[in-house]
Amino acid sequence: MMLRMGRASRKIAIPVLIGALALLPAPARADDEHEGTFWTGYMSTWWLDESHGIWFDTHYNVDTFFLVRGGLTRRFLGGASVTGGYAFLLLNPDFDRHEHRPWGQVFVPYEFNDRWSVSGRVRMDFRILDKVEGGRVRSGHEFVWRPRINSSVTRRFPRMRLGQPFLQASHELLINGAVTDGRKVLDQNRFSLMSGLETKWVTLRMGYMHRWLPNARGGDGKHEHAAILWFTQSVDVRKIGRKRRKVDYENFPEYGGP
């Protein structure tokens, strides 16, 4: 169950959320690189009871990264939750750079009514990466910590025979916590617009994401234009083999992803 907001809270939350979603990347420069890609992912929480769950998600972005991430979730009254865990990534076009990533997050959903809802998420990544010099992976590691702020707006439509359709707009800002060795403060800026369908067994999202990467090591910036196909599940382990619980796609406003 998600928190429901009073009239005063809505007056504050709506402009704040709109402002967050409006934080688009810097205007494109003539020397910026533009690249198209395809990003698919699977996100899930396996609930052991009403408050405790096991998080698992995996993502593949063509020529960019492959990720496997797990964690433990503690959900509180009203729907807010805390999750912590570990992720392993393969990076670079040849997937020859490895990353080990302990991570944690706080997620808070708010429901205005049966049609509109919003959510906010703060995540912290602790990145342990293979060193790179001259475009090649070298021996040794580097450590970078990265806060991430995500906000999302969801508009649901009348239920159809196949399930509950919805539209979702999301924005995420990724910040380098330690600006060293040429790294810029802004790591990434993401904006996505997706349509979705919540069915009895799984929630499907399809849409577009724009990722602005100012190039952490200097040089030209990069605009990534991604076609998105994501699948989400919320499973009550106690009811496996019996009637499945309703999928709660609001637990996944983003989209995962590194």
Image (cartoon, grey):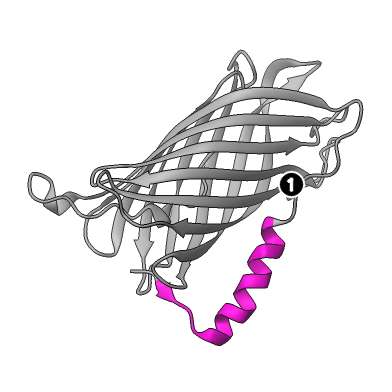
**Residue at image point 21% right, 60% down:** 49
Image point 24% across, 55% down: which residue?
Answer: 246
Q: Quadrant of residue 92?
A: top right
Chief secondary structure of the magenta portion: helix
Front in this rendered view, residue 95 or 197: 197
Residue 121, above or below 165: below
* Image coords of residue 88 (percent x, y): 49, 32
Q: Position of residue 110 (x, y in %)?
A: 47, 70
Q: Nearer the viewer, residue 166 or 133?
A: 166
In the figure, is residue 232 to the left or right of 146?
A: left
Q: Residue at x 66, y 44 (%)?
A: 190
Q: Is residue 6 magenta?
A: yes
| First to last magenta residue range | 3-21
Horizontal relation, residue 119 to residue 130: left or right: left
Q: As displayed, is residue 99 above or below residue 103?
A: above
Measured as percent of width and height from the top left, residue 62 is found at: 56, 20
Quarter of the figure with the N terminus: bottom left
Q: Is residue 38 shown left or right of residue 36?
A: left
